[in-house]
Amino acid sequence: MSGNPDLWNERYKQSLLGVFGTPQRVLVRGSGCSVWDDAGNEYLDLLGGIAVNALGHAHPALIGAITAQLETLGHISNFFISPPQVRLAEKLLSITNAPDGSKVFFTNSGTEANEAAFKLARKHGRNADGEGAVNADGKPGSSVPGRNRIIALEGAFHGRTMGALALTAKEAYKAPFEPLPGPVTHIPFGDIAALEEAVDETVAAVFLEPIQGEAGVRPLPDGYLKAARQLTTDAGALLIIDEVQTGIGRTGSWLCSGGEVVPDAVTLAKGLGGGIPIGAMVTFGEAPSSLMAAGDHGTTFGGNPVATAAALTTLETIESEGLLEHAAKLGTWLRSRLESLDHVVQVRGAGLLIAFDLDAPVAAKLVTTALEHGFIVNSPGPATIRLAPPLILTQQQGDRFLAALPQLIDQVIDQKENS
Ligand SMILES: *Cc1c(COP(=O)(O)O)cnc(C)c1O
């Protein structure tokens, strides 16, 4: 295979909006846990399209399902029912142990799932008893009835559209686009006392990620979700859990928060479609599910037959290949191996959502060096490397990376010391 990366780079720069910086490779093909660039170089994909490609690349079950669905019925709009949409909704309610009365709304992305949840929170706040809505500055006096404050955490990432962006913590992402919907208050991460202080009768909802992916794979401390459930219930606020990155087997179970609490809503996306764009909001139980009535929300593509057929097959394949157990076991092994490496000061995560911190801010350099040696990883922070490989990653493939990693780390540390 021959290619001309410079030409693609030039054409990319000329034709695509420059919001992603300069991508480092032109990828043309994938199979299993490998992808190939246009010069024929192979890479072990330890990022999986950012926690998306649960079944790796070109999984035959996914290809079969998508092809068959497209040959049968490709798109119809939400004026009509399609069988894969209903089957997927039922399956999601079953694997998330959703109580009676729970419902699903399909989207095309994580940010849209969170937009739906934001609207759910608004609707809830309108109806809720409370001390009344506050203005954008947090002061009382809004003419809108009900309550409208939203609580999210420092370090939170919930997406890039206006509502989800307001829930996101990073000032640099938000500042150029203000004013954003609000008021959203970001409280210190993992601090139960701060949550207790913040959640009162002006709060419509609390948004939480069980593990903050973009902030460097930071798990909430033990007991935090339970405390959040109790505090929101007591205050009459919704608890909304963003499992866009952590859900669908990524952390070794269907939901990272599963079994710990029953939230009012969970948002999903990334791994759900195995690489086909689809997201979902699952509302848990009768009360939150009945907040949204006909006309309150909508989507043209959400729940599209091809996307839902892809997601259904992704879930069935995760089951039939035992990938929840596999992700849990392989992740534990990977983390313990990473912990023993020189220059690695902390390892975090669950299942196959893993990050490790280096003792120097060389993560960006390590990403580049790893790429040059045939490994795709990512750096969510200056000293942090994130791994979110396909759930089908084998121990041998993990071993290949672990065998190469010490030299890669030494190389970037040496470069830093000599510069
Ligand atoms: C990626 C991500 C989102 C946004 O999903 P998009 O599909 O990129 O819109 C939201 N929340 C979390 C936790 C994420 O990791």
Image: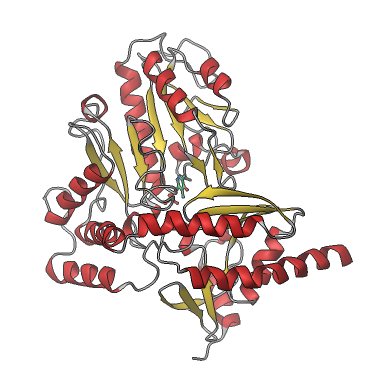
Residue 380, compared with residue 221, is above or below; it is: below
Q: Residue at x 86, y 63 (%)?
A: 417
User: Residue 279: image x %, image y %?
Assistant: 33, 49
Q: How many marks?
A: 0
Q: Is residue 353 visible?
A: yes
User: Residue 328: image x %, image y %?
Assistant: 44, 53
Based on the displayed image, in which of its 4 quarters is residue 376 positioned?
bottom right
> Looking at this view, is 305 or 9 the one in front?
305
Relative to residue 243, is residue 297 drawn left or right?
A: left
Relative to residue 299, is residue 101 drawn left or right?
A: left
Q: Residue at x 56, y 86 (%)?
A: 4
Q: Is residue 419 visible?
A: no
User: Residue 297: image x %, image y %?
Assistant: 26, 37
User: Residue 389: image x %, image y %?
Assistant: 48, 62
Residue 369, compared with residue 197, is above or below; it is: below
Q: Residue at x 35, y 25 (%)?
A: 122
